[in-house]
Image (tube, rainbow, N blue to C red):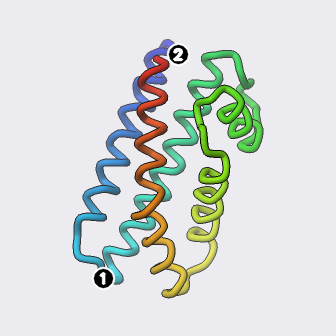
Amino acid sequence: MSDNDRQQIRMEQLGKATAALKLALQQPEDEFIRDSIIKRFELCFETARKAIRQWLMEQGEVPGHATQKEVMEAAFRTGLIADADLWSELTRWRNDSTHEYEEASAVAAAAFIRQRAVDAFDVLRNALASRT
């Protein structure tokens, strides 16, 4: 499989993950839907990181063994990600959501996802699409 094929697969996966997140966000929010929103956010986040890594590897910007920190720094340096603070926030919410559960935190996470995360994933998808 060529690098271009891998990137195309990553883009399709990111598109599907983002669509699934948006679908969950359209539902009336209760505990079950909130959990779905958070899990779908986690999936989007991980899919986005894989797509970023794949693109950067294809461009020769990072080696295959690069750390997540190196990948994100390269994404910012190359302009693939314009808002490093937002992606730091996304990372924090992703890490917090997978390590502990508290209802107040879940409500705050869902609000953050609704207000900021979906747009970040859409901006990334557009940036990747314009560069492939």
Residue lying furthest left: 27
Mark 2 or 1: the one toward you: 1
Q: Earlier in the sequence, mark 2 or mark 1?
A: 2
In the rendered structure, are the residues bearing label 2 and label 1 in contact, judged by CB atoms less than 8 Å apart? no
51 relative position to 79: left or right: left
- Residue in the foreground of this view, choosing between 36 and 26: 26
The residue positioned 37% from the left and 47% from the top of the image is 17
Which corner quadrant of the image does residue 49 belong to? Answer: top right
Residue named by callout 2: 3
From the top left corner, tell me how far across and down residue 101 is, in percent.
55, 81
The residue positioned 66% from the left and 52% from the top of the image is 85
Q: Which mark is residue 91?
A: none
Decide: few, some or many residues near mark 1? Use Cα within 10 Å; few <14, some 14-19, many ≥20.
Answer: few
Which corner quadrant of the image does residue 121 belong to? Answer: top left
User: What is the three-letter code of the residue carrying label 1?
Assistant: Asp
Residue lying furthest top: 2
Distance, label 2 to label 1, CA atoms, is: 41 Å
Q: How many discs mark residues in the rendered view?
A: 2
Decide: few, some or many residues near mark 2? Use Cα within 10 Å; few <14, some 14-19, many ≥20.
Answer: few
The residue positioned 66% from the left and 26% from the top of the image is 78
Residue named by callout 1: 30
Q: Can you say whether 112 is above or below 78 in the image? A: below
Residue lying furthest bottom: 103
Q: Can you say whether 71 is above or below 25 in the image? A: above
